[in-house]
C-alpha cells in the first residue's frame, strides 16, 4: 500500500505501486473496432504463441462468432454483432432488396434461449464446448420471411483481458499466483496457481476462468514472454488492419483520442472510447477499446467497478458483526440466573 | 430427458409456429431461470452473461456452514468452560473441532489443484479475504484441535499427567480459538462480498450480520443437540439471539431497493432461504420455550437451527450464482448508474 489510490481511483503507475523499482513504461492495447474485419487472426496467433488448448469446436449461432466469450482457453475473442442500421454515412445499397442478413434480432433471441439452458448460463464459453443445438438445418432466425431482412451493419470487436489498473482478480488471489508485472500488466503464474477460483468471481469483466481438466486459472498474459524479449504481443503482431495496437499506454491514449475525433468528424457519432478513462471504476484499463455502440452490446459491462473499492467498508461491517457475536456470547453467559 | 442433457440431434425450426418454443430444455415446466428483466429492456450480446459464474460448487456453501458451526461452538464451549458447564464445553469443543475438520476438507477439495493447497501459505495478503481467511484458520485451528484433544484424553494417560494440566491446557487452547472465532464467523461474508458477483457485492453490508447470526444459531444449535438441558441455558439464549440476527439480516437483504438483490427472492435461492427461515424461526421459538424442559425437543430445535443455517448459506450462494448467469443483473444497474451520472446521456445511436 504505497498510494492512497492503491485500491481504487486513478493510479499513475501501477507497476511502481506493486513494488517495481525501475521498470519499463506501462504498455497495453488499444483495440480500434472501427477497422476490425473479423478475421480472427488475433485469436489464432494467441493460441499458437501461447499454446492455448482447444476450447470447443461448436457452432454457436452468434453470427461468425463461434468462440462466444473470453475464457480459460480463449484469450482473444472476436465478437460479431449484426444490427439493423447503417454504419456512419455508409450505404450498403441493400435497403431496397430482400437480401441483407438473416433477421438479426431473431438470431440473438434463438441463441439467448439456448444459452439460458447451458449449465453455466453460457459462462463456459471460451473455456469448454457449449452445445446450443447448432448446426441445425435452418440458420437461426431464418424461419422468418424476407420482409424482415433489412439494411444492416456488422460490428466486430476483438476482446481481451483489460489488464486493469485496479485488477479484481489480482486483488483477491490468495496465493500470489496473479501478479503485476514490470510492464504494468496482470499475469497468472501457472506454477503457483492452486485453482481456488476466487479470481473468476473477482473479475468484473468475466475474463479469467478455470480450465476444468487442468484446475488452474488462465487468461491473457499480454505475451509477457514476448514483451521481455522486446517483441509485441502475438495478437497485435498478427492483426492485418492494426485494429489491435500495442504500445506504451500514454501513447495509445493519445492515439485513441485522435482517432475518436477523426471518426466524429467523419460522421460516426456513435464512436466512443471504453476503458480509457483513469477515473473509471477500475482506474482505467491497460487494454481499452474504441466501440461503435454501447459496451453491453459487445458483452462488456457498461460501468465496471473493482470489488476492492469497498474493501475497507466491508471489513468494518464484518468487524462490527464479529464484535456483536462476541458480545452476544458473553451476554448469554452473564445473564444466567435472571430467567 | 433431463435439463442438463444437451440436445444433440440436428433440429429444424422451419415449420415451428413459435420460434421460441422451448426447444432446448424441452419438458421444463419451471420458469425460475427466465430473465429477471425482459430481454427487450436492456441490451446484451446474444443474452450471454457478462460475468463468469463462480466455479465453486456445493463445497463452498458447505464450508461457509461448517466454518460457522465451528466458530459458534468454540465461543460456546469457552463460555461453558469458564462458567463450569463441562458437558456443554465438551460438546462445543468436540463438535467445533469436527466441523473444523469438515471445513478443511471442503476448502481443500474445492481447489482446482488440491495438492497445492499449501500455496495459500506463501503470502499474507490483506486485499484478499481468502488469504486473510487462511491465516484466520491457521490461528484458529491449533486451539480448537488442542481443546478437543484434552476432551478425548484417555483416563490412563490423564492419570500420568500432573493433576490439573489437561484442564488448564484445554482452557487456554479453547480461549485462544474462541478469541479468533468471531473473525472466522464473519470473514466469509467479506469473502463473498469482495467479488464482482452482483447479488453478493450488493449485500455486502448485511452479509456479515447474516453470517455471524447464522454461526451463532448453528453453533448454539449444536450445543442444544449434544448437551443436557440443564447445562444448555446459554446455548438456548445464543440460539435465539443468533437466529434473530440471521432472520433480520436475511430480510434486510431482500428489502434493499436494488435489482441485484432480487436474485435472493427468485428461484432456487428463494426456496432454500424460505425453508431456512421456517426452520430457524421454529428452532428459535423452541429454544425459548419447550427446549428448556425436554431433551428431545431441545435436540429437535438444535437440528432445525443447524439445518436452517445450512440452507441459508446454500441459498445465499445460489443467489450469487444466479446473478452472474443473467446479464440483466450486471447491465441494468450499471447502465442506470451511467445514465444518472451523465445526466443527458448521448443517444445519437438509437437502436430501433
Image: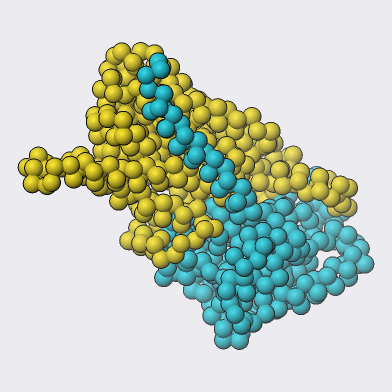
Chain colours: A cyan, B yellow
Eyeballing the image, is A164 above or below B199? below
For residue A135, side relative to residue A36 (left or right): left
In the image: residue B9, left or right of residue A155: left
Numbered-mark total: 0
Residue B171 location, x and y as percent? 28, 42
Q: Residue at x 83, y 70 (%)?
A: A257
Q: Residue at x 67, y 72 (%)?
A: A13
Judge left or right: residue B27 versus residue A252.
left
Q: Is residue B58 visible?
A: no
Residue B102: x and y in percent read 31, 44
Work out which residue is located at the far bottom of the displayed protein and give it.
A230
Residue A331: x and y in percent read 44, 29
| Quarter assignment of residue B168 | top left
Near-viewer residue (A121 or B244): B244
Q: Tell me residue B218's x, y (percent).
A: 39, 31
> Does residue A9 appear in this view?
yes
Residue at image coords 76%, 77%: A251
Report the quarter where the N terminus of chain B lies: top left
Q: Nearer the viewer, residue B147 or A311?
A: B147
In the foreground, A127 or B56: B56
Closer to the camera, A70 or A91?
A: A70
Above or below B264: residue B130: below
Residue visible at 91% across and 63% down?
A267
Which quadrant does the C terminus of chain B fall into?
Answer: top right
Judged from this view, the residue extending furthest toward the front is B163
User: Looking at the image, is A194 positioned above or below residue A251?
Assistant: above
Quadrant in the rendering for residue A253:
bottom right
Q: Is residue B145 above or below residue A129?
A: above
**Res. B181 image quadrant:** top left
Amino acid at each position: 500500500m504505497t498510494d492512497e489510490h492503491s485500491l481504487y481511483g486513478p493510479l499513475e503507475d501501477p507497476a511502481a505501486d506493486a513494488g517495481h523499482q525501475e521498470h519499463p513504461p506501462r504498455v497495453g492495447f488499444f483495440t480500434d473496432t472501427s477497422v476490425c474485419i473479423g478475421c480472427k487472426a488475433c485469436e489464432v496467433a494467441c493460441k499458437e504463441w501461447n499454446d492455448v488448448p482447444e476450447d470447443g469446436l461448436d457452432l454457436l449461432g452468434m453470427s461468425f462468432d463461434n468462440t462466444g466469450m473470453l475464457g480459460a482457453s480463449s484469450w482473444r475473442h472476436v465478437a460479431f454483432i449484426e444490427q439493423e442500421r447503417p454504419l456512419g454515412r455508409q450505404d450498403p445499397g441493400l435497403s431496397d432488396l430482400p437480401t441483407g442478413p438473416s433477421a438479426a434480432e431473431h438470431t440473438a433471441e434463438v441463441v439467448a434461449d439456448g444459452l439460458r439452458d447451458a449449465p453455466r448460463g453460457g459462462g463456459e464459453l471460451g473455456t469448454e464446448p457449449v452445445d446450443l443445438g447448432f448446426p441445425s438445418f435452418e440458420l437461426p432466425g431464418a424461419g422468418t420471411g424476407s420482409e424482415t431482412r433489412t439494411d444492416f451493419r456488422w460490428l466486430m470487436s476483438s476482446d481481451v483481458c483489460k489488464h486493469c489498473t485496479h485488477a479484481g482478480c489480482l486483488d483477491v488471489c490468495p496465493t500470489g499466483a496473479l501478479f503485476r508485472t514490470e510492464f504494468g500488466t496482470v499475469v497468472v503464474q501457472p506454477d503457483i496457481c492452486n485453482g481456488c477460483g476466487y479470481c473468476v468471481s473477482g473479475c468484473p469483466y468475466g475474463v479469467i476462468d478455470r480450465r476444468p481438466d487442468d484446475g488452474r486459472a488462465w487468461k491473457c498474459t499480454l505475451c509477457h514472454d514476448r514483451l521481455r524479449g522486446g517483441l509485441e504481443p502475438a495478437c497485435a503482431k498478427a492483426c492485418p488492419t492494426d485494429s489491435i495496437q500495442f504500445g506504451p499506454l500514454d501513447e495509445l491514449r493519445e492515439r485513441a483520442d485522435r482517432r475518436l475525433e477523426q471518426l466524429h468528424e467523419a460522421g460516426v457519432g456513435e464512436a466512443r472510447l471504453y476503458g480509457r478513462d483513469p477515473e473509471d471504476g477500475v482506474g482505467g484499463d491497460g487494454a481499452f477499446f474504441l466501440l461503435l455502440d454501447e459496451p453491453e452490446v459487445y458483452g462488456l459491462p457498461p460501468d465496471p467497478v473493482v470489488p476492492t473499492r469497498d474493501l475497507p467498508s466491508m471489513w468494518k461491517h464484518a468487524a462490527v458483526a464479529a464484535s456483536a457475536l462476541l458480545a452476544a456470547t458473553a451476554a448469554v453467559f452473564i445473564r444466567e440466573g435472571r430467567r | 430427458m433431463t435439463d442438463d442433457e444437451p440436445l444433440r440431434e440436428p433440429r429444424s425450426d422451419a415449420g415451428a409456429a413459435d420460434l421460441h418454443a422451448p426447444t432446448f430444455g424441452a419438458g421444463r415446466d419451471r420458469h425460475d431461470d427466465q430473465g429477471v428483466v425482459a430481454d427487450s429492456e436492456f441490451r446484451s450480446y446474444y443474452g450471454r452473461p457478462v460475468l463468469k459464474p463462480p466455479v465453486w460448487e456445493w463445497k463452498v456453501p458447505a464450508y461457509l456452514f461448517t466454518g460457522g458451526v465451528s466458530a459458534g461452538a468454540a465461543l460456546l464451549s469457552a463460555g461453558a468452560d469458564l462458567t463450569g458447564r463441562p458437558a456443554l464445553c465438551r460438546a462445543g469443543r468436540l463438535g467445533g473441532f469436527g466441523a473444523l475438520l469438515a471445513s478443511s476438507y471442503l476448502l481443500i477439495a474445492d481447489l482446482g489443484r488440491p495438492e497445492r493447497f499449501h500455496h495459500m501459505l506463501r503470502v499474507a495478503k490483506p486485499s484478499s479475504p481468502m488469504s486473510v481467511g487462511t491465516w484466520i484458520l491457521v490461528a484458529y485451528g491449533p486451539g480448537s484441535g488442542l481443546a478437543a484433544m484434552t476432551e478425548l484424553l484417555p483416563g490412563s494417560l490423564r492419570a500420568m499427567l500432573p493433576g490439573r494440566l489437561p484442564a488448564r491446557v484445554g482452557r487456554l487452547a479453547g480461549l485462544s480459538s474462541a478469541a479468533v472465532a468471531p473473525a472466522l464467523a464473519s470473514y466469509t461474508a467479506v469473502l463473498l462480498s469482495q467479488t464482482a458477483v452482483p447479488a453478493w457485492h450488493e449485500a455486502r453490508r448485511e452479509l456479515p450480520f447474516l453470517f455471524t447470526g447464522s454461526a451463532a444459531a448453528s453453533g448454539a444449535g449444536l450445543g442444544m443437540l449434544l448437551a443436557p438441558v440443564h447445562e444448555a441455558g446459554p446455548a438456548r439464549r445464543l440460539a435465539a439471539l443468533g437466529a434473530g440476527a440471521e432472520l433480520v439480516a436475511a430480510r434486510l437483504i431482500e428489502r434493499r431497493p436494488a435489482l441485484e438483490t432480487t436474485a435472493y427472492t427468485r428461484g432456487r435461492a428463494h426456496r432454500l432461504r424460505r425453508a431456512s427461515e421456517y426452520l430457524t424461526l421454529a428452532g428459535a421459538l423452541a429454544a425459548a420455550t419447550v427446549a428448556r424442559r425436554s431433551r428431545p425437543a431441545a435436540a429437535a430445535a438444535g437440528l432445525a437451527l443447524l439445518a436452517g443455517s445450512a440452507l441459508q448459506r446454500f441459498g445465499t450462494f445460489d443467489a450469487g450464482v444466479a446473478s452472474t448467469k443473467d446479464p440483466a443483473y450486471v447491465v441494468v444497474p450499471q447502465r442506470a448508474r451511467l445514465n444518472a451520472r451523465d445526466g443527458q446521456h448521448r443517444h445519437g445511436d438509437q437502436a430501433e
